[in-house]
Image (cartoon, coloured by chain):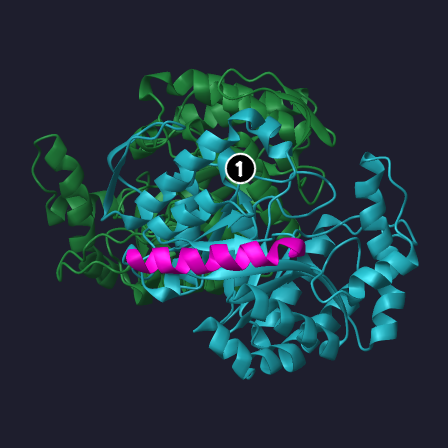
Chain colours: A green, B cyan
Amino acid sequence: MFEIGIFSFGDTYPHPVTGIRQSVHDSLRDLLERIELADKLGLDFYGVGEHHRPDFSVSACSTILAAAASRTKQIRLGTATIVLTTDDPVRLYEQFATIDQISAGRAEIGLGSGVFLESYDLFGFDYEDRKWIYDDKIELIAAIDAAGEKVSFKSKSRPELNDLYVWPRAYGDHLSIWQTTGLNAESFERAARLGLSVQTGAPTSEFGRLADLVSAYRQSGINHGWSKDRLKVTLSAHAYIGENHRQALETFFPHYQAYVSNMRLHRGKPAPTRDQFEEIASDLDSNIIVGDAEQVVAKLKHQRARVGHDRHIFQIDWRAVPQADQVRAIHILANDIAPALRSDSSIANAAA
Amino acid sequence: MFEIGIFSFGDTYPHPVTGIRQSVHDSLRDLLERIELADKLGLDFYGVGEHHRPDFSVSACSTILAAAASRTKQIRLGTATIVLTTDDPVRLYEQFATIDQISAGRAEIGLGSGVFLESYDLFGFDYEDRKWIYDDKIELIAAIDAAGEKVSFKSKSRPELNDLYVWPRAYGDHLSIWQTTGLNAESFERAARLGLSVQTGAPTSEFGRLADLVSAYRQSGINHGWSKDRLKVTLSAHAYIGENHRQALETFFPHYQAYVSNMRLHRGKPAPTRDQFEEIASDLDSNIIVGDAEQVVAKLKHQRARVGHDRHIFQIDWRAVPQADQVRAIHILANDIAPALRSDSSIANAAA
């Protein structure tokens, strides 16, 4: 079954028109209410991701997800993404196994090496070392999950584990671990070898290459003896989902403009125009998804047919989009978009 | 107002009669239900403490407390105790500030250097180094709390912070930080200097010396310019609170015997007899508190008059005491014991 989810960093950027920042307390209250709503309406996944700066209220992912776990019933709860390089796989495993126990098996952990770099300074790691440290730590967390009660592992990036308890264990026979990657064949192959799922945010211009990687990953995972339910692929996107095409474009443009302007400023480029925005929004291959239910369904069917992924997740709280707009988007995702995708036979075939 | 609280490690020791261990899932479910009940009945505090072994379901304290925060309304949530020496003050601050934000100011963090030693191996610290590392880390977490938005601190035990965000900040103007100590005058004085509260589990034979330390700590804290609400003292105890004296002794004895036998075994001593148990239970100075509401009130009034502390907390889930017995104990604590102590004028005077 094709899955639909949401992810959030607890955006607290100033509103593009009023300039007002939401407080951390209000941001987290709203986030937990959105997770509760998504759970009630039957969406499949809610994720949070790690930053350490006043633009986002989420730094401690496991803490937020535990709060969400105890007020939800069926939704899966995970991360998109935790910076594994600058964290400790042993602590992370214990935290997420605890959430998994509390939620009777609904925890997932998504691990990357970071886009924002503040955690490297904060926890004393050199960004230049990120590859070997990440490689070491992803092997370690997979080894913890694969171990019996006690764990032994000679890590290069932290003290070795010599027949020690990492406790508690996951609720079921394993913890759902996701590796975040772009178009890195080596990362896909490692995920296949270790039985990890994959989350990717590859640029849409590369969907052809991504589809090949996804297909090779699934085959390799099966060759390594893993069951299909461990070999999942998530595609992430930014979205504003409104009541109709015109409302979505009108309301969202200032938020989009603020977001892109800021990124372009660093490269000395001008702010995007309304025409450029509408062009991106209408491009079926774009991972900036703006529109009403019908448009989003068309786009997702198109992208699903190209990539063959299992789950699409959307960041809907970016650049101060108000809570009311996000609540509407969750309703549309759950009531209109998810059912249309689940019943789509071309998608069911693509997933087979 | 004198406060009554509970703390738990998520005991999953085998039942002394049946030999059955509770599963982690059931243990955490029961723990969260107890916290919810204690909140509804108006108890002041619920704490959890860190271990990394199959005898306890709690390793990730902030994870459990966040789950509790989102289903409670008024109770304060903290730790008794986290092993600060083997953890990272920056991560801890972010986790507990997040709980503080979610709960609108109800988070507390209690920090010690550990009684059980498994975290030293697990996180790669030498137990011999515990003093200087703890000293360094308690200064760091206090400095993070005292800082403005960004933090600078030259730590000896972790990478230094050079004008970096530790985010989010606490909900109010500071996070409630507690230092766990025995009868160490230096620790009391440091807590007074840094504006930290103190949790102690000093042996009852030393109540006289403890009272002097508490009194000196409060005076020193005021001299350092801290308000009284930061200079709190908690005393911890083990308890079994039953419907009457006889029921409490009868039901609890096998659990107590299993607990003490195990400790004595290491020292080659015999298991305690029923007579020895009854003697300890009837001793007004003992911090093993067994009895009905009336007996517990008498004992707490006596100890409160001797020590002059602000809060008494009880571990009621030890050595497989069943959930039903703990639920009864919470009812008695909230409905009978707490009101009797709050209205006791001798206690009000002692606290002044």
Decide: is B7 above or below B262.
below
Q: Would residue B298 appear left or right of A26 to someone viewing this image? A: right
**Residue A41 visible to an observer of this rendering:** no
The kind of residue on which mark 1 rests is Leu
Most foreground residue, A203 or A296: A203
The residue stretch that appears in magenta: B204-223
Measured from the top left, where is residue B336 in percent x and y? 66, 81
Most foreground residue, A174 or B96: B96
**Residue B246 visible to an observer of this rendering:** yes
Measured from the top left, where is residue A189 in percent x and y? 53, 19
Decide: is B338 above or below B180.
below
Q: Would residue A193 appear left or right of A10 to someone viewing this image? A: right
Image quarter of residue A249: bottom left
Q: Main secondary structure of the magenta part?
A: helix
Residue at 24% across, 56% down: A320
State the residue position of label 1. Answer: A92
Residue at 66% across, 66% down: B34
Most foreground residue, B59 or A43: B59
Residue B218 forms part of the magenta stretch: yes
Most foreground residue, B351 or A167: B351
Residue B213 forms part of the magenta stretch: yes
Measured from the top left, where is residue A39 in percent x and y? 52, 61
Image quarter of residue A74: bottom right
Measured from the top left, where is residue B285 in percent x and y? 69, 63
Q: Chain of mark 1?
A: A
Quadrant (top left/top right/bottom left/bottom right) for the C terminus of chain B: bottom left
Mark 1 element type: helix
Decide: is A165 above or below A130.
below
Residue at 65% across, 66% down: B33
